[in-house]
Amino acid sequence: QAWQLQIHSFNIAWSIMLLSWGANQCGQCCTDDDASDHRGCLVWPRLTTVASISSRLGIQISIASISIGEAHTLLLSDYGDVFACGRNREGQLGLDGGPDVHQVSIVEALRPWHIARVACGTKHSVAVSRDGRSFEWGSLLPLTGTDEEVMYRRKGLGRDFEEDLNEKQRRIVAESWSQFITNGTAIEENDGGLKALEDHERRRTSVRSPRECPGLDGLLIVGVACGFAHSVLCTNSGVLYSAGYNEKGQLGNGSRQPSPTFSRVELPGVCRINGGQGTATLACGLNHNAAVLEEGELVTWGMGTFGQLGLGHGRKEARVPGTVDIGAVQQVACGDHHVLAYTWSGELFCFGHRDAVGGNSHFERMPQLNRNFQNATIERLYAGGMGSFVTTSKSASLCSWGYNQRFQIGRGAQDLEPLKPYPTLSPIAGMNLQSFFAGSYTCVAAMDLPKTPVLPAGVQNTSGNALLLAAFRNSATWNVTVTARDNSRQLGAHSSVLRARCPSLASRLKPGRGDNSWDLELLNYSSKAVAALLEYLYCDYCEADIGVASELRPLAKEFNLAHLGSGVEVSTVTKSADEEIEWVRGPNGQWVSKAIQEMSGSWAKEVADSVSTYASDIASLVADGAEKHPDFVDLAIQQLDGHVQRVLVARPLLQCLDFFRAMLEDGFANVVDASGAIIVSAENAAALASCLHLLVSDARVPEDTLGALALLVEAHRCCLFDIVHRVQSILIDLLDGADAVLLKELTYAAELYGLSKLATQVRSSSPA
């Protein structure tokens, strides 16, 4: 039932949607289902709203960043929570359960920390908290070797290292091997060669719960990138540390010796990374890395067989970072076997595998200038697998090129030139790219919902205020029966919402058969058009194909809904490819020239100047005072000292809240005072009133710690868990400058209400 949702939005709208495409055999596309074709792929971008994931989890999610490995995905929320889906056979999701997780799930083990960054390797993951701590999980090298974790058996020319070689022969082989993996470094210990061989043959094991990254005590980590089986972290002073496999020198410490413990990368000179600015200045491919130093110098190291290091024909690998001579670089990105670098002079260089970048860099192992974007300024670079992606100032779309073996380039099955950039995501007004990540075979983009209130068909609308959306979908709460021309579907609404959102439509209400019940007849319009109109009133968006959108045009004008009219104009206009003539779809379904159908007069000006009034409209659904109205419930919030504060709340809002719905049902006459108001007890009446206002507006967000604590108490008591979650983040933000007494109160509150993230942050803020 819709009213059972425990999602009560702090923000007016969940304004992010996810578009994903490519391989989805393990559920890594965040679609919350098994959507894919017979090849296990999403051939075309598939939309999933963050609101739908939030509703299922019971936790409001606002996406801050995304990371994707070979077959798993991590989502990071603004609140510092980590969510995961996809392959979990090696424990790379940090979740209990089966080998694959097809629904986005929260990583409970990380909830005590406010995570600021996440990164996915091929089969492992790393997270960095806001206070600089780092965690890793998945397929990792064990911290201590055991007989099961170390392979001693080396076979070559049909001979076994342990069984067929005597002690002297084993020592000679081990010393020779150690010279190779340590890059000629002398072994001082008597059995140093054997130990080096054992360490190199250590196998990765599955670490299913996040562990702290070893070797980083006392360091403040601010950046992270991961490759096939190695990780590179950046400190706040710009120093790099790495751990993992090292057979191609990808750890950058001069050897080929693997290490489960992080050690310093030998950067040239005394240069530092630019403040650890995430993927813009630090990136990992499968077995190579690239970093931008403080003066814009680009350095690369690791495997270079396909030219991905850009260091010259003779450099198939680099065990320490080497400088790429292309001038000052502002951004860098790495695919599996290629690198993209964008310079401050506006030049894009690509080098690496020919299937990813084309040209001769694969053979010459030198950077190659890409001339496809000479007339545009590149805003962001992205790379993953054999694909490359850019956004430019000239176009709002995401352009891509490369090898499309699992449809990760986002072009479906079209026969396009693979190495020529094409738009992957067609721009829709306001549909801005907020976050994007390209994995080896999968891409996920977090985008704003379009500014136009009329969304294309197929874009499922779950935006708007969560409580209103729940009320709209719960026919048991309707007190308005809506009748359309064809009457082919049940339609209903709430009189309070209609009066707040569209007074001219509410003026058409006629008394129904019951108390406070109403009838609304819209017999000139189809059920589809009326349903889209109601969806717009509740959510500020509606989904409509071009036929329904054209029918919304006269509806918007009749009821003076200028903002809806602006969406209709965007959705019903097309342009001839050859003659540049604009055409408009009319209410009768026929196309006419826009010059003939051009709007005129005051309505045209209203549409052109329109802005959404959704926030202010729904804020009126909760009001201070005690004025009686059948659409509203009068709440008398009573403190223990007898102080009473009156608040009016629209009935459908309370009907979707378990705590208050029980008070509206029969059998609760003892909570009604002489004036008919429902009595609600509270420790702090003003705080509970603020909670009710926060159901529809952000106007009452507390700015001080004591106010936030009072809000926390009332929100938890009334089961407003989304507000509890948000208040926890507010309290964390207010920790700076808190004295010992206040820290003690916060510790008690965190323990009492189970706020593990707040408890962790308070401990880290408390004096030793």
Image (tube, grey):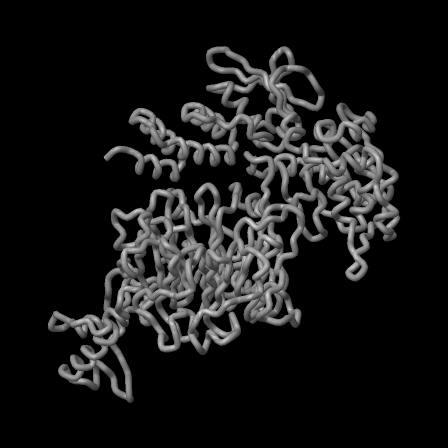
Q: How many marks?
A: 0
Q: Is residue 90 visible?
A: no
Tell whether 148 sits left or right of 304.
left
x then y, percent, for residue 494:
72, 31
x then y, percent, for residue 749:
38, 30
Q: Is residue 76 visible?
A: yes
Q: Which residue corresponds to the image point at 26% horizontal and 67% vertical from the top-left?
A: 254
Q: Is residue 526 above or below residue 683?
A: below
Front residue (pair 305, 14): 305
Q: Which residue corresponds to the image point at 58% horizontal and 39% vertical from the top-left?
A: 5
Residue 281: which quarter of the image?
bottom left
x then y, percent, for residue 416:
64, 70
Front residue (pair 384, 136): 384
Q: Is residue 353 above or below residue 574?
A: below
Tell whether 145 sits left or right of 752.
left
Q: Residue furthest bottom?
A: 157
Front residue (pair 347, 212): 347
Q: Which residue corresponds to the image point at 23% horizontal and 71% vertical from the top-left?
A: 182
Instruction: Tell me the quarter of the image containing the N terminus.
Output: top right
x then y, percent, for residue 565:
77, 40
Q: Which residue corresponds to the image point at 48% horizontal and 43% vertical from the top-left?
A: 78
Instruction: Tell me the quarter of the image containing the C terminus.
Output: top left
Residue 41: which quarter of the image?
bottom right
